[in-house]
Amino acid sequence: MKQFILFLLFANLCTTAFAQSDIPEEIYRWTEDDLVQRTWGKKITRDESFPEEWNKNSAVYLSWQHVYECAKSGPGTISISSLIHNRIKILDEAAVTNFSEIYASGDNNTSTFNKDKNFVGVKLIKPTGKTIKINTKGFIEDKNGNLKLAIPDLQKGDVLDYYIYSREDFKLNTMPSRYVISENFPVQSKYPIKNFDYTLKTDEDWSVGMYTGKEGSKIKETIPDKKERMFTFSVKETNIPSFESERWIYPFLEGKFIRNYVRFSRNNLDKKSTGNLNKKVTKSAYDKRLKAIAEQMAIAPIGKNQFNKYLASANKMTKLSKSEKLEEYIRFLRHYYYSNGFINARINNGRSPGNKAYYYDSIMKGARAIGYKFDVLALMPRRAGSVTEAITIDEVDFVLRIKDGDEHIYFYDGDPFAAYSNLPYQYEGTDAYALETGRSISKLIKTPTSSAEENSMLHESVINFDESDKSLLHAKTKVVLKGHQIDTYPYYLTDWCKAIWKENKKYDTKKYGDPLIAKKKEKLKFEKFHDDQKEFRLEQFKGFAKNHYYNEIEEIKNTKAILNEEIGGVQSLDISFDNQFKDLVKKIGPNYILKVGKMVGSQVSLDEEEKVRKSDINMDFARQYNYNIKINIPEGYEIQGLEELNEKVDNPDGSFVSNASVAKNVLEINFIKTYKTNSLPAENWNNVKAFLDPASSFQFKEVLLRKK
Amino acid sequence: MIYRYILILFSLTICFPIFSQVSTDLAKKAEKIFPDDNLVLTGSSINITFKTTKKDQLVAIAEYTDSFISLNNQQSFPYALFYDEFSSIKSFNTGVQVEDTYYQSEDIFHSDTRMKYSVLDLKGYGRVKQVSAKKQFNDLRYLTNFYLTQIHPCLYREINVEVPRGMDIEILGFHLEENNVEYKTSQGKNGTVHSYVVRNIPSYSNESGLPGNSHIYPHILVLTKSYSVGSTRKKLFNTTADQYKWYRSLVTKIDNQNKQLKSLVTELTKDAQSDKEKLENIFYWVQDHIRYIAFEDGIAGFKPEACQKVFADKYGDCKGMANLMKEMLILAGFDARLCWIGTKSILYDYSIPSLAVDNHMICALKYKGTYIYLDATEKFINIDSYAERIQGQDALIEDGERYIIEKVPITNAEKNKQIFDLDLEINEKELTGKLAAKFNGESKSSIRYSMSNTKSEKLEDAAQSYLAYGQSNVLINDVQIENFNQKSKESNIFGNIKLSEFISKFGSEVYVYLDPYKLYNKSSIKKERKHDYWFPYKINEEVNVDLKVPSGYAINSLPEALNIENEEFKIKGNYVQENNVIKYRFSISLLKAKISKKNISEWNQANSKLDNFYDQPIIISKQ
């Protein structure tokens, strides 16, 4: 009998061991039991400890795990599998609410719950140790096709432990050429993470690009051997603190992140190679690509010939200098590619016109013909990091550059309002590989950053008190925007239909809705649209005026906005309007309080939490805000309180200057705030606060009109 | 005969330009009447008839016909019709792709309500599109209200209900006269046709603070009382007693196994010194431990979940939570009952037997001859308070085979008192001192609710931000939060306060603004508003500031007092000097949680005076 029992025990052990070793390495093969064993099995850790300072957090990820697998799963079949397994300790009611519903798409919404194979398991571990398995048949499909589950009995102190597994199968001969995995995310969460595990497993038929940043986590790479038949790329971290976003932060420039791009590529990963299985884009790859762009033979429909025809008809052929000719040519191209067809597109809800490849090709051909050399630049937006860190050329964008005298002129995919030199602010101050015409090797350069003066806003207003009601102010306002401050305002404030028609006339192209030539239907559509645009613009002007005065606007009229673009000049958007406002003057006995601080628009006001800064400061662009306000003082009154309006702060990173004076019964107030740069280290935060704080305080300033 | 035919065709062309694709004239007409809209219904109708099915069931068929006209160059919009377990869509004709999906509402985790919809495109000014659909109501209890107002403005809208002979139906009309709805009856093929026609009716308003739809928009409510099928007379809701009987039939089917709750109830009550304490322990346990997640799945939309399921899941909707509360109270020896109720947003009461009169379930406790109403879905309310939304409403309380209707008591604004007490002194250019904030009733629920989803490590920051009313020049620190987790007491937050930019100096004079909160500043209501303005609850708020005048300074002037009183609101503010302390006392009450349309002008005048009051500083000067 004893022997029989022993045998049974032995058999049981063997069976268990055998069953354990039976769990295949490949995730795609897993049954639900395999999955449960691997995620919830006896050998899996249940450690719930975490750093004590995390007790104040709402919840803690005891573990955050995401595993991908890309592999052949059968004859002619490829499987992409995904396993998410999270264990979360719930520490307060806010976390109970947050985690009381879980979605089958997981935390970062990067995987989809597809139909080939899916398993979901959810359990709660109570503080007493009791485990409650949740019935996952309660998953409900919402209107977007996502599956959500309400977690019953979730309480403070519980550990929520869930896995989501999905597998998608593809036929080999229909394998998509796109990236099957394309992820780019900072390694951070609003909850601290004790154990972080991001793993990719593939067989040899994949192109893998994984990168974690200059100071990022180490990627552990393994190549197949007797034990493991897959290539593995793994990022593991421990004790990641929680992350709260701050103003002006570019997470990819600091801190850790994961970039992962995976695409099917037959035999791309050589079993015999060692190390460096994932590669960043090499310089030679950039050189090759840049050369291809520079020498591209795309046949753009518009080129120098058409431009010469325009010049000839405009009788300008001999009168323009080389650089004027270039600028005229670019304007001509802007019209053809972006303006002509814009009205049609807006009215009929079509795609806005534009073709970047043709545009670039036309620029390059034309530049050559005029006698300029050009460069092609490869770069990424500054917030995404340096181009030297790109792991796929698909992340990279391309800009053209022409040297004209001492200056570089930049060209990028535009719109009907794009400036002649158009380097989007996203691409300022970032690394770029620049390839000069005729060369084969590119150089690593830094793109320029525009100055605050180049991105200026000048607001000039003349304000009068109403004769019969001193609580009502009448203002005549002019605003001039330059550089990146122009932004999208031309679309919202200018009569661009009229401006485009003017270009149609200049370049002899079709005028959409022209009463002389268009069909009746088109004319009607255009008229209606143009009328609607007037109303739309008026509403936009009201909003613009409200922002500029940080106050409700009673009435606005005489609105005008013109985009000035003289050849050889600097583009500016000139805006003017007349308005009234009521709430800035208050009668106090025989005197009046004038809330001048409200005439300079809203200001950045830092709250207490922001007084201390940990992350570097990255803004879109350097800029300047300049208000000049002249207020005519009514007869019989004098101004008091001007000394409170005088302030001056100037440091290498920014400045704030305000002053007020009275001359000939006119109160003149100047307010100039300058952000001198777009990028600063965190240590410079005190410099930034030094000019932001007084500008913020200015909003509350008032002067007294005292009766004489 | 021929003339009648021509007349009909002519009318159709005017009302329903079905056959024309572009109608510029009609567009111009619509534009003139609705100048602010880009999409208008030129004609919209619902024709409701009844028929007997093969299974001897009487069903209602609603046929919808809608004709849209575009008033700009491009309109893209959805056209949808809802259905559920008790209804079906028989046809849905839009001429474009039709989708069928669940209807998602933020308040409901899951509902079995589905919708058929199409996305319609009208490219061009004056483009017309006609669509039609047919919906069958299989259970006539669910044939309730139909609105003449629509999502889009209508040039012409009609609702026709053909009541077969022998069918006992009552059709109630609401807000018809004031909206110029024409009503007439005529003889149809199978019975009397009741027709409701309105012209040039605007769409649903998007103003804030609106009363519930049934309070303001013209509509009809169909009450199907009884009907005959063959020789059988079938009764639905002839009286409230019939309605209650049906509710009871659902409730008696709940398989409550309250034994599973016994140990918990014992635990909660064993040390209680009084009935009040027992009651509080049970009520607050349900409030704290059961999450509100609404599932509305067919009949589950009316039948409560069993108490043991709600207990095990630790979530439920209002019905499940009411049922759990009831069973727990019964185990504790109380006379607890389920109670149906319509919230304030619903115009009707139980004098009208219809499913449309209620939308909520709570628990009613009969105690010493009176009823106490317990709504555990109100997560942060005290046991002795009632949410504004149920105050004054009819409660239909189960009483075995019978029922009782009682009104939930109305409480006054005093119960919701919120007080900010500040003790300040002048410190150079700043005002510094202490703040004590006290919250009661629904003001307490409100702050607790706004902080409930705040992570615990951010709780103090959230309190600071709440007390600063989001102003960057108001700084609160050393915050202490008291009684936030204890239900029966007032909740308090204490801290140190610093106010920057509340002082202006002009020569020897110092202008000081004492009130950092300026409650209901710039809160005028648009004078064009067509409806009452409803607030979430009766407001009663105070700001009391004591300012110590620095030595060497004299008080030049104090602003004039403000005292405005009206049947719906009271505003009082004054400054008083007591020795070297200036006392600012301000209070505002919204006595009925609303500003009626007739009082909007008075409210705006009061608001203008209030804005001016806030702008007046105290003036002190150096001696």
Image (tube, coloured by chain):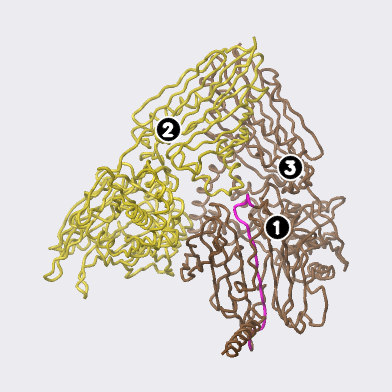
Cα gap from disc 3 to disc 2, whole angstroms: 46 Å
**Which type of secondary structure does the marked residue at label 1 adopt?**
strand
The residue to which callout 2 is attached is B540
State the residue in front, B270 or A142. Answer: B270
The residue to which callout 1 is attached is A240
- Callout 2 and callout 1 share a chain: no
Chain of residue at mark 1: A
State the residue in front, A307 or B339. Answer: B339
**Chain letter of the brown region:** A
**Magenta stretch, main secondary structure class:** strand
Q: Is residue A207 magenta?
A: no
**Which type of secondary structure does the marked residue at label 3 adopt?**
strand
Relative vertical location of residue A458 with respect to residue A260 in this rendering, above or below: above
Q: Quadrant of the C terminus of chain A?
A: top right
Q: Residue furthest front?
A: A2
Left or right placement of residue A198 versus residue A550 in this view? right
Chain of residue at mark 2: B
The residue located at (30%, 43%) in the rendering is B408
- Callout 1 and callout 3 share a chain: yes
The residue to which callout 3 is attached is A623
On the question of residue A312 being in view, the answer is no
Whole-percent x and y of residue A518?
53, 58
Q: Earlier in the sequence, mark 1 or mark 3?
A: 1
- Magenta stretch in the rendered image: A55-74
- Check contact, mark 2 vs mark 1: CB within 8 A: no
Chain B painted colour:
yellow
